[in-house]
Image (spheres, coloured by chain):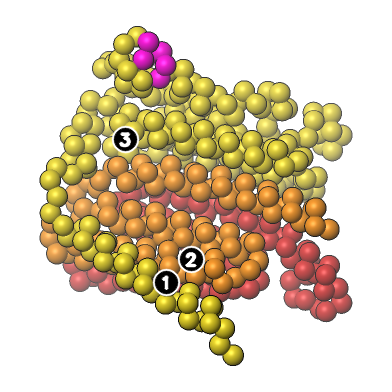
Chain colours: A yellow, B orange, C red
Amino acid sequence: MIRPLEHIVIPSGLIALGGLLGWSLFLAITGETGDRLAEIALARVPDSGVSNPVTSVLLNFRAYDTLLELAVLLTALLGIWSLGAAGPGFQKAASVLEGMVAGFVPLLILSAGYMLWVGAYAPGGAFQAGALLGAAGVMLALAGHRNAGLPSEDRLRPLVALGVFVFAITGVLLAVVGGGFLTYPAGLAKWLILIIETAATLSIGATLAAAYLGGRPAPEHATRESA
Amino acid sequence: MTSHVLGTQLLYGGSGILLVLLGLWSFLVHAPLLRKLIAINVMGAGVFHLLVAIAYRGIDTPPDPVPHALVLTGIVVAVSATALALAFGKRLDRDGD
Amino acid sequence: MNLLLALFDLLLTLTLVGLAVVTLTSREPRRAVILFIAFGLLLALVWARLRAPDLALAEAAIGAGLSGALMLAAARRASDRNSVSTEGSNREDAP
């Protein structure tokens, strides 16, 4: 039996869309352009305070994007928290898994610190470091730690907001001092970027781990009972 | 830009478009929430793949960092949207029972 | 050299699209999620080939790892629900 929507309309629409997208891709990569953004960005990398081009675009040239992206992450977590409390969590891990987790979590935190530092001149940066912290949290949650190693809610709230807060305060202070919103002065760029990235890493890690729990964290006393 | 780089961009960019179309098809055709979510994620991966392909400048030339930064923020936004969607799904299940 | 690289590109692309097709067409939730994780890891490999190591790291950790962990939990709930609603029908994926 042929259902017209599923077998005719959708496939032909998709084929038409594919043709259009393919044609525009072809035009985009064969077309002659003037100064492309890439050359301008790559030429300015030495002024940005970091030598990794991606980090310099992310935290210097297009810092607005990253600030708003951290705000999106925070909003998503608020949405998750508004939907109710987290589930009961997984059962307590047996001794072998517990031993592995006890070894891996410090290693993940150490790698996150390395990733954060190395992001200035090699592949890495706040997002990758935050993802490693989040992975440490997921691992703790899977091994039966009910709050994934996160602090209680009143201390977790400042932690997840830290990235946006530090980023925005830095931007506003720079605007007041005179450079313009998030326009770093020449000598300070490296350190300002490092401060912002550190705050962002902590927030991203805490947010991702809290998002994995899928709801508001349980109160402190309930955690002790289950532990 | 040599024809070899152009060919690589077309091959990977074309596969990115194909991933977007496959994801869109699956999103429209399949009913279960989890399958729709996976379909959206594959669509997103296709868009990222397309951007990475356009940023490619050859095996020994540094690529365009601007699309890379866009994709990096996109990945994190995608995972937070996925987590929010799953929380919605969990709540729907609980209220539906 | 160039021919070898082109062959490698073709192989990577075919595997990637093939994995996407089997991910999107598998009915069983857990199977679909695990294939999606494999897809994300292969995508990270492709981006390392396209000189985007920053993105490869992020995709492997976030796109494949964290999304996969989130979806696996959801897939487990979905299978649990299926096995409750079709009790006695002898499903393979019952826990």
What's the amino acid at mark 3?
Answer: Val
User: Whole-Å distance between the Cαs marked 3 and 1?
Assistant: 34 Å
Q: Quadrant of the C terminus of chain A?
A: top right
Tell me if A142 is positioned left or right of C86 in this view: left
Disc 1 versus disc 2: distance between alpha carbons?
8 Å
Dot 3, crowdedness within 10 Å: few (<14), some or many (≥20)?
Answer: many
Find residue A34 and report its horizontal and vertical position in percent. Answer: 12, 45
Q: Nearer the viewer, mark 3 or mark 1?
A: 1
Marks 3 and 1, the one that precedes in the sequence = 1
Residue C44 visible in this rendered orientation of the protein:
yes
Q: CA distance from mark 2 to mark 3?
A: 31 Å
Give the residue type that dot 2 points to: Leu
Outermost residue toward the bottom in this view? A1
Q: Quadrant of the rendered structure where residue A17 is? A: bottom left
Q: Chain of mark 2?
A: B
Range shown magenta: A171-176
Residue at numbered disc 2: B24
Q: Is residue C6 magenta?
A: no
**Residue named by callout 3:** A57
The chain letter under disc 3 is A
Circles 1 and 2 on the same subunit: no
Q: Amino acid at mark 1?
A: Leu
Q: Secondary structure at mark 1?
A: helix
